[in-house]
Image (tube, coloured by chain):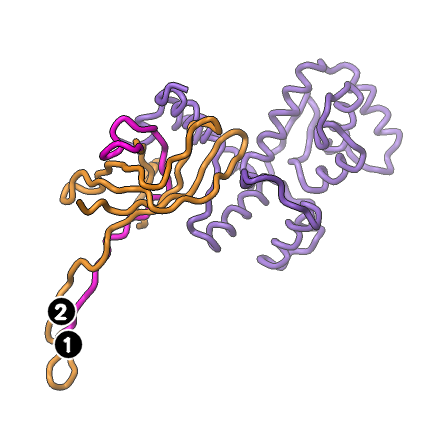
Chain colours: A orange, B purple
């Protein structure tokens, strides 16, 4: 997602996330997430007339929503999140607070004592 | 609420790093210990590494090492100007050693602020020099000559490397100097 306008170096696509093993990540560890890319997965059915021209289209959810991000840890002493840990995030008012869980993790990257890793979270369905 | 509103001091840290980034493209004059110096380049890295200067290869720096460093980055530097070098070292005797260490460290920190981070999974074998990888990258991307890459400020090169990296891998893990402010805040919040 790109911002139409970003005035004053606003951290667009960045959030503070609390990720943990408890439901919704409650009481977990705090991380800063950058470069958040949310995917609302959909599929479409196209109806055509006798000439093959589109005459109708249905959009439906065909996969689980997910988001990717870069997580910054407090330090190299901070426990990196574990696969399956949960987080509660609000991306928009329509969807409200949603629970995602950690699905993929990269190796950790370090520079001048700061530690980051790439992560993918998927929507918790139940 | 934005991160800048949540994390105290973050917006000021971002302003500082942005100033260094922007000024790197304006050839603004720099001063270290009262001497006019050039922006730090790959040429300086190679020169100082070859003579084993501790600011490049590690170890405790003596006052002679400080003078050697300042001469190498000075606008007066010329490998053939032996008399000028002698006068320069004489002027170096007047500088405060402790302040010089701090100023050189600040100068180098600024030069390397956008250097890429590394993976933490052990050491990786090296088959060529740091200079070779940069010369190759800018030769491939912008058709620059070895000489051009070697003499451009590292502050510019590291930013361009970040641009190239982001273009080729939008999910690449990148670092900012202001990450330290965020890291310190996270330590407080997490109680570690």
Expressed as whole percent of the image width and height from the top left, the position of residue A17 reads 31, 33
Q: Residue furthest bottom?
A: A51
Q: Nearer the viewer, residue A84 or A50?
A: A84
Which residue occupies 13% across, 78% down? A48
Expressed as whole percent of the image width and height from the top left, the position of residue B144 reads 64, 56
Is label 2 in a helix, a strand or a loop? strand
Expressed as whole percent of the image width and height from the top left, the position of residue B72 reads 76, 33
Q: Nearer the viewer, residue B166 or B104?
A: B166
Q: Is residue B167 left or right of residue B129?
A: left
In space, the residues marked 2 and 1 are separated at their CA atoms by 8 Å
Which residue occupies 74% across, 40% down? B46
Tell me the subunit letter for badge 2: A
Magenta residue span: A20-46
Q: Is residue A56 left or right of residue B139?
A: left
> How dense is the environment of label 2, judged by Cα within 10 Å: few (below 14), some, or many (20 and up)?
few
Q: Nearer the viewer, residue B141 or B28?
A: B141
Location of the C terminus of chain B (image quadrant): top left
The reply to whether the magenta stretch includes residue A31 is yes
Say whether mark 1 and mark 2 are on the same chain.
Answer: yes
Expressed as whole percent of the image width and height from the top left, the position of residue A51 reads 14, 86
Q: Which residue is mark 2?
A: A57
Is label 1 in a helix, a strand or a loop? strand
Corner quadrant of residue B181: top left
The correct choice, above or below, for A3 with respect to B187 in the image is: below
Q: Which residue is mark 1?
A: A54
Would you say residue B18 is visible in this rendering? no
Corner quadrant of residue A12: top left
The reply to whether the magenta stretch includes residue B2 is no
Location of the N terminus of chain B (image quadrant): top left
The correct choice, above or below, for A26 with respect to B146 in the image is: above
Q: Residue furthest right?
A: B83
């Amino acid at each position: 997602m790109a911002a139409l306008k970003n005035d004053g170096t606003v951290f667009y696509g960045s959030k503070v996330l609390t990720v943990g093993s408890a439901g919704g990540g409650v009481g977990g560890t705090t991380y800063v997430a950058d470069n958040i890319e949310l995917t609302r997965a959909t599929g479409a059915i196209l109806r055509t007339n006798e000439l093959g021209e589109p005459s109708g289209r249905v959009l439906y959810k065909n996969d689980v929503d997910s988001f990717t991000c870069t997580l910054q840890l407090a330090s190299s002493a901070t426990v990196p999140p574990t696969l399956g840990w949960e987080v509660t995030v609000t991306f928009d008012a329509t969807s409200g607070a949603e629970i995602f869980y950690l699905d993929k993790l990269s190796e950790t990257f370090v520079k001048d004592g700061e530690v980051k890793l790439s992560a993918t979270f998927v929507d918790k369905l139940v | 609420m934005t991160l800048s509103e949540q994390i105290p001091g973050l917006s000021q840290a971002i302003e500082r790093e942005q100033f260094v980034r922007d000024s790197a493209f304006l050839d603004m004059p720099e001063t270290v210990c009262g001497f006019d110096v050039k922006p730090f380049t790959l040429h300086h890295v190679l020169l100082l590494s070859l003579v084993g200067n501790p600011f490049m290869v590690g170890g405790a720096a003596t006052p002679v090492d400080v003078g050697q460093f300042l001469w190498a980055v000075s606008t007066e530097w010329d490998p053939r100007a032996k008399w000028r070098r002698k006068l320069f070292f004489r002027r170096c005797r007047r500088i405060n050693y402790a302040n010089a260490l701090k100023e050189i460290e600040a100068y180098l920190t600024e030069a390397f602020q956008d250097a890429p981070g590394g993976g933490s999974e052990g050491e990786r074998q090296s088959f060529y020099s740091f200079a070779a990888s940069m010369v190759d990258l800018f030769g491939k991307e912008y058709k620059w000559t070895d000489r051009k890459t070697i003499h451009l400020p590292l502050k510019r090169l590291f930013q361009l490397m970040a641009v190239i990296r982001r273009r080729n891998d939008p999910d690449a893990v990148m670092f900012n100097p202001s990450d330290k402010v965020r890291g310190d805040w996270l330590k407080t919040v997490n109680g570690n």
